[in-house]
Image (cartoon, rainbow, N blue to C red):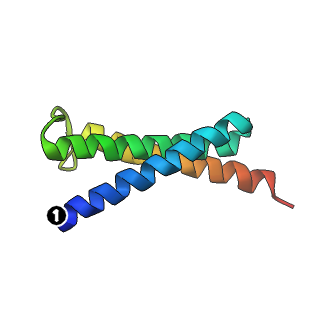
């Protein structure tokens, strides 16, 4: 096993666990901040799955390139961070004194 394979396996296993528990939490809460954090986790796990499929050659993204990377990957990376940012901003706004 190569070090890259181990890192991909760790990311997939832990990402799956985080996504699974996030979806369980989603069914228990309707809080907008938590929902945004959960959606960010799902998007991040989806990005890890797509990247893994790309690494093994099952899935390949071409098309528009932005700053040297395919636009698809930039959108996936940025979307997860924007969702986290929005969730944290809602919590800050809600908890201001």
Q: Looking at this view, name the residue that lies furthest to the front.
A: 1
Q: Is residue 15 left or right of residue 59?
A: right
- Rendering quarter of residue 59: top left
Foreground residue among 12 and 69? 12
- How far across and down, in percent of the image, does residue 16 sit? 44, 47
Q: Compared with residue 23, is residue 11 higher up or lower down, i.e. above or below? A: below
- How far across and down, in percent of the image, does residue 1 sit? 16, 63
Q: How many marks?
A: 1
Foreground residue among 6 and 51? 6
Q: Is residue 24 left or right of residue 29?
A: left
Structural crowding at the residue carrying mark 1, measured as other residues with C-alpha within 10 Å and reported as few (<14), some (14–19) or many (≥20): few
Q: Looking at this view, name the residue that lies furthest to the bottom.
A: 3
Q: Compared with residue 61, is residue 74 higher up or lower down, i.e. above or below? A: below
Name which residue lies at 82% across and 58% down.
Answer: 96
Foreground residue among 51 and 24? 24
Q: Which residue lies under the disc numbered 1?
A: 1
- How far across and down, in percent of the image, does residue 75 sit? 36, 40
- Rendering quarter of residue 62: top left
Q: Is residue 8 visible?
A: yes
Q: Is residue 49 left or right of residue 68?
A: right
Q: Is residue 35 visible?
A: no
Q: Looking at this view, name the residue that lies furthest to the right.
A: 97
Name which residue lies at 42% across and 46% down.
Answer: 44
Q: Is residue 70 left or right of residue 9?
A: left
Q: Looking at this view, name the residue that lies furthest to the left.
A: 57
SS at mark 1? loop
Name which residue lies at 26% across and 39% down.
Answer: 71
- How far across and down, in percent of the image, does residue 32 sit? 70, 39
Q: Compared with residue 23, is residue 5 higher up or lower down, i.e. above or below? A: below
Foreground residue among 69 and 4? 4
- Rendering quarter of residue 97: bottom right
């Amino acid at each position: 096993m190569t070090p890259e394979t181990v890192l991909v396996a760790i990311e997939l296993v832990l990402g799956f666990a985080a996504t699974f528990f996030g979806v369980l939490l989603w069914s228990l809460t309707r809080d907008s901040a938590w929902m945004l954090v959960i959606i960010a986790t799902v998007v991040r796990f989806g990005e890890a799955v797509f990247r893994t499929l790309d690494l093994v050659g099952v899935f390949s993204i071409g098309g528009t390139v932005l700053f040297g990377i395919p636009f698809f990957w930039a959108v996936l990376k940025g979307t997860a961070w924007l969702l986290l940012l929005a969730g944290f901003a809602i919590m800050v706004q809600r908890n201001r004194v």
